[in-house]
Image (tube, helix red, strand yellow):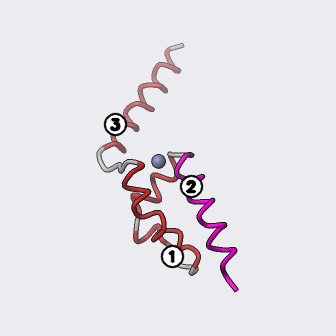
Amino acid sequence: MKDSIKLVRTLFEDLSRTREEEIDCDAVFDVLDVYAEAKTRGEDPSELLPLVQQHFEICPCCREELEALLSILEADLP
Ligand SMILES: [Zn+2]
């Protein structure tokens, strides 16, 4: 029992730590096309937009948007 309390506490500490430099979904949507285009060109957008990359890791909603956009962009490729 004590261990799980400790675990939850650790999780919350992690959350509050990442929150400081977290960006919200609106900010991600603003750069979603830039991110997707860079990825389509074979670049690594995580270097350019590390916070966006980080957001995709925690937000399934934005990740879905990205995947939808990527499939559109990739369909346009020759
Ligand atoms: Zn999001």
Where does label 1 land, which residue? Answer: 38
Question: In screen coordinates, is 73 left or right of 37?
Answer: right
Q: Is mark 2 within 8 Å of ligand 1?
A: yes
| Amino acid type, callout 3 | Ser
Kindly report which numbered mark, 3 or 2, lies closer to the viewer in this rendering: 2
The answer to whether marks 3 and 1 mark residues whose Cβ atoms lie closer than 8 Å is: no
Q: What secondary structure is marked by label 2?
A: helix
Question: In screen coordinates, is 78 left or right of 23?
Answer: right
Kindly report which numbered mark, 2 or 1, lies closer to the viewer in this rendering: 2
Furthest residue to the top? Answer: 1
Mark number displayed over residue 11: none
Q: Earlier in the sequence, mark 3 or mark 1?
A: 3
Q: What is the distance, in whole Å, between disc 3 and disc 1 at their CAs?
A: 30 Å
Q: Which residues are magenta?
A: 61-78
The image shows residue 74, relative to residue 21, as above or below, that is below
Q: Depth check: 22 or 18 in front?
A: 22
Where is residue 2 shown, x and y percent of the image?
49, 15
Question: In screen coordinates, is 21 left or right of 66?
Answer: left
Mark number displayed over residue 65: 2
Furthest residue to the bottom? Answer: 78
Q: What secondary structure is marked by label 1?
A: helix
What is the quadrant of residue 1 in the picture? top right
* Residue drawn at (56%, 81%) of the image: 41
Magenta segment includes 63: yes
Q: Quadrant of the C terminus?
A: bottom right
The image shows residue 1, relative to residue 6, as above or below, that is above
Where is residue 65 shown, x and y percent of the image?
56, 55
Q: What is the distance, in whole Å, between disc 2 and disc 1 at their CAs?
A: 15 Å
Where does label 3 land, which residue? Answer: 16
Q: Earlier in the sequence, mark 3 or mark 2?
A: 3
Badge 1 density bin: few <14, some 14–19, many ≥20, Cα 10 Å: some
